[in-house]
Image (spheres, rainbow, N blue to C red):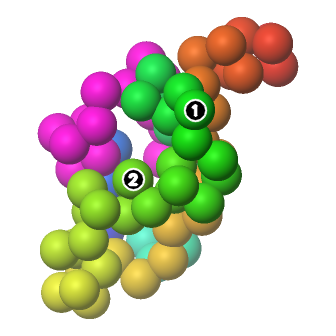
């Protein structure tokens, strides 16, 4: 069974994150990703950026589902 910490490591290896939290049940996962790299990108572009980092894991079938909330540091701070 896939551990959420593994997904965190995959994302962190390809994307500088100020905050990164992944939770899930072993098959379906949710991620909160806060990165300055999201500045100027819309929601779809942000998710595409993350998907690019973990593409090989989707392609291999190791990772099946990941819902993402991708925020800039300013957006994360304004949400408290």
Residue 2 horizontal/vertical position (percent): 31, 68
Report if residue 17 lies within the magenta region.
yes
Q: In which quarter of the image is the N terminus?
A: bottom left
- Return the residue at label 1: 40
Q: Could you tell me which residue is drawn at 17 percent across and 74 percent down?
A: 56
Q: What element carries label 2?
A: helix
Asked if one can make out residue 24 in the rendered structure from this viewpoint, the answer is no
Decide: is 16 above or below 59: above
Residue 62 versus residue 25 in the image, above or below? below
**Measured along the vertical axis of the image, is residue 48 above or below residue 32?**
below
Residue that numbered label 2 is attached to: 49
Residue visible at 46% across and 21% down in the picture: 36
Residue 30 is inside the magenta segment = no
Q: Quick one: quadrant of the C terminus?
A: top right
Q: Nearer the viewer, residue 24 or 32?
A: 32
Q: Nearer the viewer, residue 18 or 42?
A: 42
Viewer-nearest of labels 2 and 1? 1
Extent of the magenta region: 9-23
Left or right placement of residue 36 versus residue 62 in this view: right
Residue at figure coordinates x 28%, y 37% from the top left: 15
Instruction: Give the left or right position of residue 8, taking residue 72 as reference.
Output: left
């Amino acid at each position: 069974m896939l551990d959420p910490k593994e997904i965190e490591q995959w994302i962190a290896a390809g994307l500088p994150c100020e905050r990164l939290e992944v939770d899930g049940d072993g098959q379906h996962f949710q991620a909160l990703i806060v990165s300055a790299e999201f500045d100027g990108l819309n929601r779809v572009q942000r998710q595409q950026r993350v998907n690019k980092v973990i593409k090989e894991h989707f392609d291999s079938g190791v990772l099946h589902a990941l819902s993402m909330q991708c925020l800039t540091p300013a957006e994360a701070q304004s949400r408290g």
